[in-house]
Image: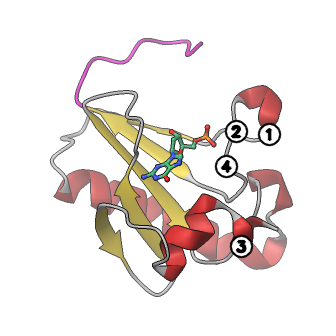
Amino acid sequence: MSEDTIFGKILRGDVPANIVYEDDHCMAFKDMFPAAPMHILLIPRKPIARLCDAESDDQSLLGHLMLTASKVADAQGFGDAYRLVVNNGEGAGQSVFHLHLHIIGGRSLSWPPG
Ligand code: DGP
């Protein structure tokens, strides 16, 4: 279960993190292995393992995450050039099975991603 991931431990306060935002539904903290000068992870408090495990009941939570990502990017000074990434499943590079949005910026970002 995703409650037992490292992100579950961060949510519970059992593992320290550099938290930049939190509310009743989600938490944002700095990525420990940043892929860019600015790299924040935004996670729901609800332990959804992967995006594909989200259900229709999660619609407002997923919308909240998108709007919060924008708010966090603004508050953290990302300007208007940043990228949101959700890796879904091992084959796409997901290594922590608690849904998370990567908010990446602070350098020019090429497309398509690798
Ligand atoms: P993904 O590969 O999409 O599952 O991304 C997981 C991210 O989580 C990866 O960029 C590194 C980050 N990460 C892993 N463990 C920790 C941790 O203990 N603390 C923090 N802040 N980030 C972590």
> What residue lies at 42% left-to-right and 12% top-to-bottom?
110
Does the CB distance between marks 4 and 3 fall below 8 Å?
no
For the residues marked 2 and 4, what is the alpha-carbon distance in whole angstroms? Answer: 6 Å
> What residue lies at 62% left-to-right and 76% top-to-bottom?
60
Q: Where is residue 108 in the image (x, y as percent from the top left)?
A: 28, 17
State the residue position of label 2: 94
Q: Which amino acid is tagged 4?
A: Val
State the residue position of label 4: 96
46 is within the stretch colored magenta: no
Is residue 63 shown to the viewer in this render? no
For the residues marked 2 and 3, what is the alpha-carbon distance in whole angstroms? Answer: 16 Å
Residue positioned most to the bottom: 24
Q: Which of marks 2 and 1 is nearer the N terminus?
A: 1
Magenta region, residue range:
106-114
Tell me: is circle 2 under 8 Å from ligand 1.
yes
- Label 4: which secondary element: loop
Q: Where is residue 71 in the image (x, y as percent from the top left)?
A: 30, 62
Q: Where is residue 7 in the image (x, y as percent from the top left)?
A: 57, 63
Q: Earlier in the sequence, mark 4 or mark 3?
A: 3
Horizontal side, residue 50 vs residue 104: left or right: right
The disc placed on residue 3 is: 3
